[in-house]
Image (cartoon, grey):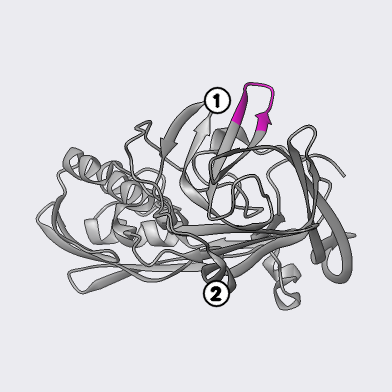
Amino acid sequence: MKKNKSVVQNILTNCLACIGLLAGCAGFTADENTSCADVIDGYADQFAAARVTASGSVKIDEVNDSVTIFLDVVGGCLKRGGLFVYDPNYYFVDKYDFAYKFRNDTLLLSFTVEDVSIKEVDTGIWVGGSSGKLDGTWLLTQCMYVNDEYGCGNEGYNKYLKIDGNKAEFRADDRADYNYMNSIFVVDLFHFFGSASSEPNVKYVFNGSQRVDKRAEEYGITIQEKKNKSMKFTYDNREFDLNVNYARYRDSVSVSLSSGGITCVGNYSVKYDVPPELCRDENAEYLQHSRYDDSESEALRFEKNNEVEFGNCINGILGREINN
């Protein structure tokens, strides 16, 4: 068992999605007046309604102001002798070390991210508990510190942590007020319209961006109407309707883009706990290591998208060459 080390380059683009821990500030702005998540007293009800993403145990060292969280991986899709098999008895523990401190009733959890090119300290800002007491239900705000630089983001999900004695559990839910049309996916979509490079991946609908309007202007796109899950815009004298048909964090996404009677559909799905029915050789191209670091866990995750087909469909509408 090894200490987890995240891929630093992706810290601001949901790099820790694989473990459901400290994400939530992709594309953050270093403006201390930026509004973070709405803070209310207590998140027990929201936590109870949210989906479990990880659970395990916790060890608190009050002398050194540190907390270690051990997350259990029970059962998993493994590769044995070149074949994929599901083992319900597989067990692994992921270990994460944090420094903690309280600022009034706010909990700051810090961890060190380090690789060959960089070393930084990332601090998540948690609210909802009691000052000086780790036990409680905490919400990860949309704000954080990176090497003491403060910034806020706008992600499409909430993440919760409940500490109860020696037990820890993480949960997540989708934000009802989130605007999917202000996401990195839309930025990438507009870039694809203007440059025909790197097809847009719909999984990034959960990551907020401040560059949507700017990217639209750069590529001659005129936004006519924008709602939380839909947009009408024009490009090259064509009208387009973009819709998020379904979006569930850590599960699946489906979007549609229509113009001139043609509809292109972009899909994405992910399963961090691969069910037995997906742990099959025919899914080999979609089964991959479930962590981005040097963790010893063998459990695989299932991740599938149709970004190439989606991009080719858009190219067809625009009368451009289809990519192979």
Residue range (magenta)? 112-121
User: Where does the image place residue 187, in percent across and percent down from the top left?
Assistant: 32, 47
| Residue at the extreme bottom | 277
Which secondary structure lies at badge 1?
A: loop
Which residue does the image show at 80% across and 59% down from the upper left?
A: 72
Residue 89 is covered by the magenta coloring: no
The N terminus, quarter of image: top right
Which residue does the image show at 68% across and 67% down from the upper left?
A: 283
The correct choice, above or below, for 110 with respect to 301 in the image is above
- The answer to which of marks 2 and 1 sits earlier in the sequence is 2
Q: Main secondary structure of the magenta part?
A: strand
- Residue 16 falls left or right of residue 188: right
Residue count near mark 2 (Cα–Cα under 10 Å), binned few <14, some 14–19, many ≥20: few
Q: Nearer the viewer, residue 106 or 159?
A: 106
The correct choice, above or below, for 314 with respect to 6 in the image is below
- Quadrant for residue 301, please give it: bottom right
Return the residue at label 1. Answer: 147
- Quadrant for residue 276, please give it: bottom right
Residue 115 is covered by the magenta coloring: yes
Residue count near mark 1 (Cα–Cα under 10 Å), binned few <14, some 14–19, many ≥20: few
- Residue 128 falls left or right of residue 73: left
Q: Nearer the viewer, residue 9 or 127?
A: 127
Three-letter code, disc 1: Asn
User: Where does the image place residue 140, in percent across and percent down from the top left?
Assistant: 53, 51
User: Where does the image place residue 31, in percent across and percent down from the top left?
Assistant: 34, 32
Whole-Å distance between the Cαs marked 2 and 1?
34 Å
| Residue at the extreme left | 237
Three-letter code, disc 2: Ala
Return the residue at label 2. Answer: 49
Which secondary structure lies at badge 2?
A: helix
Q: Are marks 2 and 1 in contact (CB under 8 Å)?
A: no
Which residue does the image show at 65% across and 44% down from the upper left?
A: 132
